[in-house]
Image (cartoon, grey):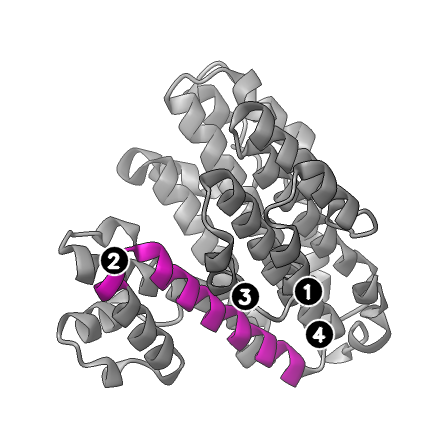
Amino acid sequence: MKYLQAHRVSSHDERYAYACGRIRALEMRLLGRQRLERIAEARDLDEALRLLSDTDYGVHLDEMEEIGYVGCLHNETRRVLALVDALTLDPDVSDILRLKYDFQNLKVAIREKVSGRDLAHLYYDYSRYSPDILTAALKTEALEALPDIFFEPASEALDKVSKSRDPSEGDTVIDRAMFHLFLERARSYGSLYLEALIRTWIDLANIRTFMRGRYLGIESRNLPELLISGGFVKLTDLRETYSLPLDEVRQRFEFSPYKPIIEIGGEGIERGGTFVDLEREIDNYLISFLHLARYFTFGLEIIIAYALLKENEIRMLRLILAAKERAIAPEALKGRLASVE
């Protein structure tokens, strides 16, 4: 695959020698699948939290009574992003880690504007910009007050959602703007690995849209508006196979690295109407890609890959702890856990 050549041009930036030394030490403390499964098998929430006491999350447990486990996980995310800010020498590129939350906040702000509901609990406060900037601009319809990168997607998304009353149309506009911005920054930086990461992200988003659209019966003529250009997979391949039986879709992607996602995810959807397998396989693929940074010597890639692996770990923990809180059986959890090794 093309991205396997990334180390040839982007893994020896000696400016990051110290930073990468710190990150390599932290990588050793990432929770493996075996550890996550042990936590998933805990009798209850209290036991699950005790199993975290000797991990990076242990420093937050004293706050548990006041802010709960969700607050503790948010604090761990803040800690990781602050570490990236402290270590980066290329903030225009590493900012994608925070800007991802800005674009999510923009989606929420548009939904809030159009629906009239209070969605304050859905905002992230570890984005690059304060959510208040987004909400104030949308409430007053003074979009020119937004940071430049948000003006066009906010205008287009707000216009679409105001007409259709369908928030998902606005989400697609915002996702497209986000991925194209990230791709532009990765290319400007000159890292094949980071460029390939964003293109892979786009592919995975498109595959998710493709599989969900088939299940929900979205008409094929509407598919092009939902897909995002810039990935490795040609959009024509997705459009041409959209209405075909799953076996024929698999054949079309026989030599694609995404075949297991389509095969396993598609079977789960057709067999039981569940997207659990699809989401797990998407996670597995992205994690495998991020682990390629292990082969790099130095570079910003190592820092960004660690932060994204940590983000996935936090998301898995939140899933597990929520299940413990609701007394959901461990067996129901294990099928959702990504292979994080």
The residue carrying mark 1 is 234
Q: Amino acid at mark 1?
A: Lys
| Real-space CA distance between mark 3 and mark 4, rounded to the nearest whole angstrom | 33 Å
The span picked out in magenta is: 161-188
Horizontal and vertical percent position of residue 315: 50, 42
List x then y, in percent, for residue 283. Answer: 62, 44
- Counting every numbered tag in the picture gives 4
Q: Report how far apart the C-alphas of labels 2 and 1 lie in the structure.
A: 31 Å
Looking at this view, is 289 or 78 the one in front? 289
* Quarter placement of the C terminus: top right
Name the residue that disc number 3 marks: 228
Task: Residue 326: say if magenta.
Answer: no
Q: Amino acid at mark 2?
A: Arg
Residue sitting at 68 percent across and 34 percent down? 264
Residue at the disc numbered 2: 111
Closest to the observer: 52 or 209?
Answer: 209
Residue 59 x, y percent position in the rendering: 47, 43
